[in-house]
Image: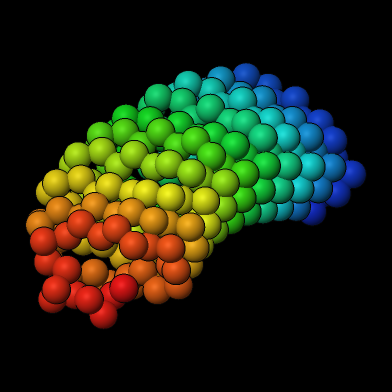
Amino acid sequence: EEIGGYAFRGCTALEEIQFPDSITSIDIWAFRGCSSLKRVVLPPHLYAISDALFADCTELTSVELCEPIGEIGAFAFSGCKKLKEIEITKYVSQIGKYAFSGCEKLEKINIPEGVTYIQECTFANCTSLSVIEIPRTIKTIGASAFQNCTALRNIEIPVGVLSVDGFSGCTGLRAIEIPAGTTSIGDFSGCENLETIRIPASVKKISGGFTNCPKLLNISWPNLSENASNF
């Protein structure tokens, strides 16, 4: 059985949903803008969270995912300003762009093994996010992926990530180390408290750079002299 797209969109008085176990599909935007919805337990045989499914559910604080879910769509929880916790289950291999953008109360996130790409603005403007677990399967951190995550103090980027972008406006970052083998770095502008960065020789050029990073004094990068304009 399935719930069609836009089925309950904008039902602003809806506070609770009880899904029957027979539900296997919920189409796009089905509960978008249900601004009184507080908690969701998804049915046990759901395999994907569709695009913008719970976007702008501004009172939503907790979501319990079922184990079979393999995909979280674009904008799935975007604008859920009070979402405090969500455990992404182990079979999730794709998280869409803007999936958690604007989740201002979200404090920590686990990205499961199997995800290879953190897409554009996936966690942008998650201003309480202070703990991120990035698995070794990640190859690319996309543009603005963690933009304006101002509570983020430390980030460990594992070996194997080839392209790193998306940390502009992370004013809590003090230091960052780019692992050996990374070949591309994007935008770190506006990281106002960043003091130290280590970049491997495998990075030849930076796009975006470190503008408006007034405390950045310690830069370790063999190719710095050819790229001084990025700082």
**Residue 113, position in %: x, y?**
32, 30
Camera-side residue of 95 and 105: 105
Please identify the quadrant where the C terminus is shown: bottom left
Q: Residue furthest bottom?
A: 229
Q: Is residue 66 left or right of residue 200?
A: right
Can residue 219 be seen here? The reply is: yes
Camera-side residue of 206 and 199: 199
Camera-side residue of 28 and 170: 170
What residue is shown at x 46% (from left), y 51% (from top)? Answer: 173
Q: Is residue 128 above or below residue 46?
A: below
What residue is shown at x 62% (from left), y 44% (from top)? Answer: 128
**Residue 20, position in %: x, y?**
68, 22
Q: Is residue 173 above or below residue 188?
A: above
Please identify the quadrant where the N terminus is shown: top right
What residue is shown at x 20% (from left), y 45% (from top)? Answer: 179
Camera-side residue of 121 and 49: 121
**Residue 25, position in %: x, y?**
55, 36
Q: Is residue 194 left or right of residue 9?
A: left
Q: Is residue 19 left or right of residue 16?
A: left
Query: Where is residue 132, by image quadrant?
Result: top left
